[in-house]
Each structure stands twice: as C-alpha cells, then as structure tokens.
Image (cartoon, helix red, strand yellow):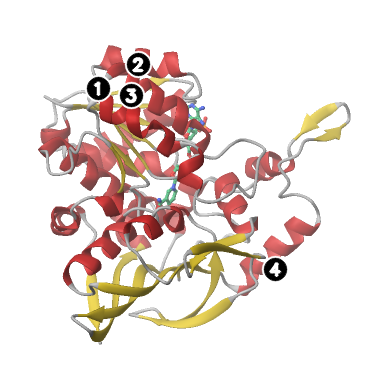
Amino acid sequence: MPSTLIIGAGGVGAATAHKCAQHNDELGDICLASRTLYKCEAVIEAIKEKGNAKIQNREISTAQVDAMDTEQVAALINSTQSTLVLNVASPYCNKTIMEACLETGAHYLDTAVYEQEGYINEQPPWYANYEWKYRDAFSASGITGVLGIGFDPGAVNAFCAYVHKHTIDTVDTIDIMDVNAGNHGRFFATNFDPETNLREIMEDVIYWENGDFVSIPHHSKSMTYDFPELGEHKVYSMGHDELHSLPFNIPSKRIEFWMGFNDQYINCFKVLKELGLLSNQPVDVEGNAVVPIRLLKAVLPEPSSLAKDYSGKVCIGCLVKGSQSGKDTEVFIYTICDHKECYKEIGSQAISYTTAVPLVTAALLVTRGDWNVQRLVNVEELNPDPFMELMPKLGLDWDLQQS
Ligand code: NDP
C-alpha cells in the first residue's frame, strides 16, 4: 500500500493535505511535515472538521522536519514508510529532498524549480543548473521524479503537451497566461510564499525566442488579453519555470509567460523595490543582520490567511498557435477557478487550490502506474491524456477554444 509524505504546511501544503485525504484510499497513510509543527496540526484538525478524509480511520499524522537536512528527511521517509514525497516547502529545499528520495527509494514530486538562497537572475535553463543533474541517479534507482507539477508550472505544461499531441502538430508560439481577478481585501499581499513570489517578479524576464533565451527588464513588456469569463486584463511578460523545460520538449519559435497585475500591485511593488525592501542581501540593523525581503515576509499576510475573505476568479491558460496538417490553428486551453468555492471545499484560496489539485492528480497517476516512469521528468514529457481526464475529477475542470 502506498504511503504519502507531504513536506511544507503553508497555503499549498494545506490544500495538498486536504486533497490527499480525499484520496487516501489510493494514497494510503499521510504524513504532513514542516518546519513549524503547529501549522501541520492545524491542517489536520481542519481536515477532520470538514470530514475531508475518504477513509476516516486511515492515519493522517504530523511531523517536524528541517527539509534542508537530507538525513532528517530520509529518516522521516523511512519512519513513515513513505513511497511518495510531495515537496511543497520552499524551493530552497528541492535538492535535499530529492537526495533523501534517492537514498530511500521514494518517488518525488515538486511544484517549483530549485532556488539558491541569496541569489537572483539564475542563468537559463534553470532546471539544467540543479534538477536535471539528478536525471541519471533517478534512472539508476528506478524512482520517478516529476518536476514542477503545480498549475503553472504543471498543468499548463500538460496543456501544451495535450494540444501538441492532439490539435497542433507544428507549434509556432505558446503564451502561458495567468490572471487572478480575485480580491482579498488587503492593501498588499502575495498569493504564495512572498519571498519566492516577489523574487520571480523582480528578476529579469527570460523567455524563449528563435532558438535561444532572450532577457528583458521586468515589467517592460505587456499586452491586454480577453480571458473567458474574466474579460480583458493587462498581463506582463515574466520569467517562469515552464520556459526552462518546454522549449526542449515542444519545439516552438517563441514561448513566453504572462502574469496579470493590477495598478495597485505594480505601485506597491515599485515602492518596495525602490526602498530596497525586496533585497535578499542582509543589512545591519542595530547590530543584527536583517534580510529585507525576510522582514517583509514577516509583516505581510500569510498567503493561507487570505482565503476566507477572497472573492472572484482566476484564469490560467495557454494560447498555442501553429498548424495542424499544414492548416493554421489557434487554441486557448484553460482552467477557471473560484476563490470562494475553494474556501468552501477545503478552506483554501484558489492559488493554493490550483497548485494542489494537479500535484495530487500526478501523485495518483504515479501511484496507479500511468506516470510511474521511473526517471526524472518535466510534466510535458509525460502522456497528458490520463492527467487531462483525471484532474477534473479532483476539482479542476478545463476547456479549450479553437479557431
Ligand atoms: P508558504 O511560504 O505559505 O509555505 C511554505 C511551507 O514550507 C511553510 O510551512 C514552511 O514552514 C515550510 N518550509 C520552508 N522551509 C522549510 C524547511 N527548511 N523545512 C521544513 N519546512 C519548510 O508557501 P506556499 O504554500 O504558498 O508555496 C509552497 C510552494 O509551492 C513554493 O515552493 C511555491 O513556489 C510553490 N507554488 C507553486 C505554484 C505552481 O502553480 N506551480 C503556485 C504557488 C506556489 P514555516 O511555516 O515554518 O515557514
């Protein structure tokens, strides 16, 4: 029987724990582990309160772990007899958790590319700098690693693979677009880990064009797109994980990622940046070394705390242009998710929910065998069909507009 270890008890970790509990007939005993134990315990209480476990008497436990310590993670995998590890902690922890999986033989899934503390503007392709170096070791051990299986990266990579497989045999361009038209009622907040989120917005934009990576300053390129249900929104070109694997698996002339920001967000971001509060370099504060972005993280709302007041919807999708059997074709493949619906079901906001559902869908596919490929892969290397069929059953439907 499989057994599942979730590492990280933030917004995404909580949503992942609820979704795993809803499928504990297949995912087995669940352990939610993180740096701060009480956060894990609160999540387990919430799962019980909502009656979200499918098999009530199957174990759902908690543990304290420092995921930067391979030996601690390996010991926890062994003591919980976990066959599957879902890494939803900080991206700083990817390498140590991957190494623990290699040591113990557990399958590995994550939702964000590795980041090095105190380092920005990593050279492309990001996956080659860290994760892909473990490919041979995963193949030799016969364990499966699925990189970047949240929504973006994650479901959008499967969307591209699905369109390439069924609708557009020659891809010209891929524009991945993510717009959150929701309102959390706070002056300024990030929807997931502030350190990761603000860093990805602040970095130079890297995208793929004409066989190479191109770099431009952040917020220097924007467009307006008319999203299904949400209407017109301004989106900005931004560097993102997907762009560092898709070009190698789905040949395209241009692949770009766009994120929607409203004027309030952009103004706050500019002020924080100009004041130096987004810096990851320590400054001396009365004899103490303080990293400004860590200070900011400490005073901003916890992403998971936004859920109860969030209203509105999110749309994330891929605009793929190209041709099928020589005939020009254009497809927008997307998911829409409602913040309030997510809160009603599992107490999460839509950003955490849309990350957790693809992750748990993939966990089920690895467990069932469809995605148990026994090597380290990015999502678009896998057969998209079982994923596209299963994800709606876990709570996220998708649609495709073709012209
Ligand atoms: P949070 O900051 O809310 O939560 C992160 C959790 O990880 C916290 O519980 C934190 O513990 C824990 N953690 C951090 N470092 C360690 C460590 N060394 N050992 C053990 N636990 C640790 O982030 P989110 O839940 O919002 O995001 C989680 C991940 O999901 C991030 O990697 C993010 O980039 C990714 N993500 C991916 C998306 C996608 O679509 N692909 C979308 C959104 C997020 P503590 O509480 O003690 O700080």
Frontmost residue, 261 versus 249? 249
Q: Which type of secondary structure does the marked residue at label 3 adopt? A: helix
Q: Name which residue lies at 54% across and 51% down.
A: 124
Dot placed on the residue nearer the N-terminal end, 1 or 3? 1
Dot placed on the residue nearer the N-terminal end, 4 or 3? 3
Q: CA distance from mark 4 to mark 2?
A: 44 Å
Frontmost residue, 29 versus 69? 69
Quadrant holding the N terminus: top left
- Which label number is shown at residue 76? 2
- Which label number is shown at residue 82? 1
Dot placed on the residue nearer the N-terminal end, 4 or 2? 2
Amino acid identity at mark 4: Asn
Residues marked 4 and 3 touching at CB (< 8 Å): no
For residue 110, which quarter of the picture? top left
Residues marked 1 and 4 touching at CB (< 8 Å): no
Q: Which residue corresponds to mark 4?
A: 267
Q: Which residue corresponds to mark 3?
A: 101
Amino acid identity at mark 3: Cys
Q: CA distance from mark 1 to mark 3?
A: 10 Å
Amino acid identity at mark 2: Leu
